[in-house]
Image (cartoon, grey):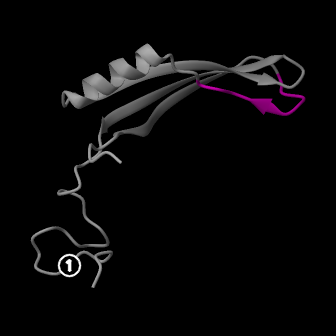
């Protein structure tokens, strides 16, 4: 297990362009190339605020594209364990963490 905090994405604005009526169940997948993930992670590791747009199509089970979606992700580093608060507890307040063994 690593002690390094992970990058944390947050949902941001989105755009939907409706193309055709959906007459079947629909799905959409956002597929990120490993190089893009590495680039975003490196920028977040450097302390940058990362705002990135991603696009995909919403497709019916019949293969018809019913919409195009653009979604913006905001990615930052998760706070380190020594800066996290748990149920109102923060390090240095004198009481043990709520999940600390007795």
Residue 29, picture quadrant: top right
Look at the image and say whether residue 1 sits in the magenta stretch. no
Report the number of numbered marks.
1
Q: Main secondary structure of the magenta part?
A: loop
Q: Nearer the viewer, residue 74 or 94?
A: 94
**Image spot of residue 28 (x, y percent):** 69, 27
Residue 23 drawn in magenta: yes
- Secondary structure of residue under mark 1: loop
On screen, residue 57 versus residue 35, left or right, reads right
In the rendered view of the protein, which quadrant contains the C terminus?
A: bottom left
Left or right of 25, for residue 40:
left
Residue 15 picture location, percent across and down:
55, 25
Q: Is residue 92 above or below residue 29?
A: below
Q: Residue at x 46, y 32 (%)?
A: 13
87 vs 74: above or below: below
Q: Depth check: 54 or 102 in front?
A: 102
In the picture, measured across the screen, residue 16 lies left or right of residue 34, that is: right
Image quadrant where residue 10 sits: top left
Q: Look at mark 1 in the image and give the residue it sits on.
A: 96
Q: Residues within 10 Å of mark 1 (few under 14, many from 20)?
A: few
Identify the residue at image location x=45%, y=27%.
72
98 shown above or below 17? below
Magenta range is 21-30
Pick the front one: 64 or 101:
101
Residue 100 horizontal/vertical position (percent) = 28, 76
Q: Is residue 72 left or right of residue 81?
A: right
* Residue occupying the point 62% across, 19% down: 56
């Amino acid at each position: 297990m690593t002690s390094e905090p992970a990058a944390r994405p947050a949902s941001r604005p989105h755009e939907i362009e409706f193309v055709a009526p959906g007459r079947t169940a629909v799905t959409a997948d956002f597929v990120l190339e490993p190089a893009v993930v590495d680039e975003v992670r490196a920028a977040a590791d450097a302390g940058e605020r990362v705002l990135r747009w991603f696009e995909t199509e919403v497709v019916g089970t019949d293969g018809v594209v019913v919409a195009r979606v653009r979604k913006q992700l905001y990615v930052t580093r998760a706070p380190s364990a020594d800066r996290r608060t748990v149920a109102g507890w923060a390090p240095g307040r004198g009481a043990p963490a709520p999940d600390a063994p007795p």
